[in-house]
Amino acid sequence: MNGAKEYAKALFLLTEEEGTTEAVLEELSAIAGIMKENPEYSRLLDTPALSKEERLSLIDEALSSFNLMLKNLIKILAESRLARIIPHLQKEYYALYCDARGILHAEAITAVPMSENQLLNMKKKLEDETGKTVVLKNTQDKNILGGVMLRYGEVQLDGSVKTRLDKFEEALAKTVI
């Protein structure tokens, strides 16, 4: 969205070089969280009603203890009236962070909560298959009836009972008697 990916990549490369990637991730996440909860902040930074000097002064004041590169990027976004992309920037930065650290986020969707043992086994199997550190989240969806639907990256594996029943029903409908 409006350059969020490019800004995130530039910031990530600079912070990797500086050795401040994790600290900037925390700070950027805090800023993005505030912007999501209070959209009026990004509108304030993007409004033409405030002079450039006033906007930059607000940023200096609010982010006085933050990483200088991050603060300067926020100023650039405010000058360009792009403060609204900060949550997208954070998301892209975090994706770059995870990719560089070999972290894979996965979601196991089940009708009922998985046990700790099931989660650990699935996590280990995914780590063995992908060679990455897996962060596995279990969510419930009673509509899948049973089994598990697994999503990670661009992959979706559907072993749900609902999908199996739907395929079986489809096959029956095509059967000529």
Image (cartoon, rainbow, N blue to C red):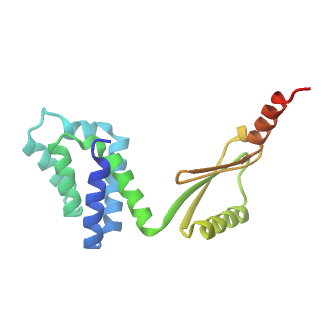
Image point 35% across, 52% down: which residue? 90
Of residues 32 and 19, the one nearer the viewer is: 19
Image point 68% across, 42% down: which residue? 141
Q: How many numbered marks, from 0 up?
A: 0
Determine the image quadrant of residue 122: bottom right
* Location of residue 145 in the rendering, given as x and y in whole percent from the top left corner: 76, 41
Where is the N terminus found, in terms of image quarters?
Answer: top left
* Location of residue 71 in the rendering, given as x and y in whole percent from the top left corner: 20, 57
Of residues 56 and 127, the one nearer the viewer is: 127
Of residues 173 and 23, the one nearer the viewer is: 173
Vertical order, 94 against 16 (above or below) = above
Relative to residue 14, is residue 107 drawn left or right?
right
Image point 31% across, 59% down: which residue? 27
Image point 72% across, 41% down: which residue? 144
Where is the C terminus found, in terms of image quarters?
Answer: top right
Vertical order, 177 against 139 (above or below) = above
Vertical order, 121 against 81 (above or below) = below
Vertical order, 142 against 96 (above or below) = above
Of residues 8 and 169, the one nearer the viewer is: 169
Relative to residue 25, is residue 69 drawn left or right?
left
Determine the image quadrant of residue 53: top left
